[in-house]
Image (cartoon, rainbow, N blue to C red):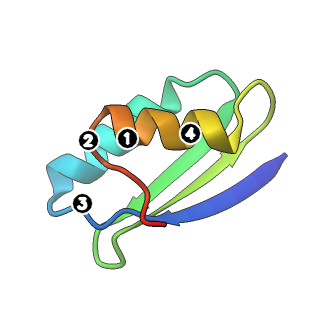
Amino acid sequence: MATVTYKVPSMHCHHCTHTIESELSELAGVREVKAELAKRQVTITFDAPATEEKIKALLAEINYPVAE
């Protein structure tokens, strides 16, 4: 199991956090998602088949790209 934290600067409201948590929770292998509006960051705990690449791709797809 792995845990990663990403900065997501386009997160601006509680609707954003809800969308991020809901969408990522549906990705196979994702165990836990916590979006923190005040810090504009998302922490994800996951196992295979989820990967960092898949998580980042999904965030970009739903218009919440990870800050590089």
Of badges 3 and 1, the one in the foreground is: 1
The answer to whether marks 2 and 3 mark residues whose Cβ atoms lie closer than 8 Å is no
| Spatial separation of the CA atoms under disc 2 and disc 3 | 9 Å
Q: Is residue 40 left or right of residue 12?
A: right
The spot of residue 66 in percent (x, y) is 43, 57
Mark 4 residue element: helix
Query: x and y percent of residue 36 in the render?
Result: 38, 67
Dot 4 corresponds to which residue?
Answer: 55
- The residue under label 1 is 60
Name the foreground residue: 22 vs 57. Answer: 57
Marks 1 and 4 sit apart, C-alpha to C-alpha, by 9 Å
Q: Residues within 10 Å of mark 2 (few under 14, many from 20)?
A: some
Relative to 21, is 14 on the left or the right?
A: left
Q: Is residue 53 above or below residue 68?
A: above
Residue at x 81%, y 29% (from the top left corner)? 48
Q: Which residue is situated farthest in the front direction here?
A: 68
Number of the front mark, 2 or 3: 2
Do residues under tags 4 and 2 come within 8 Å of each other at their CB atoms?
no
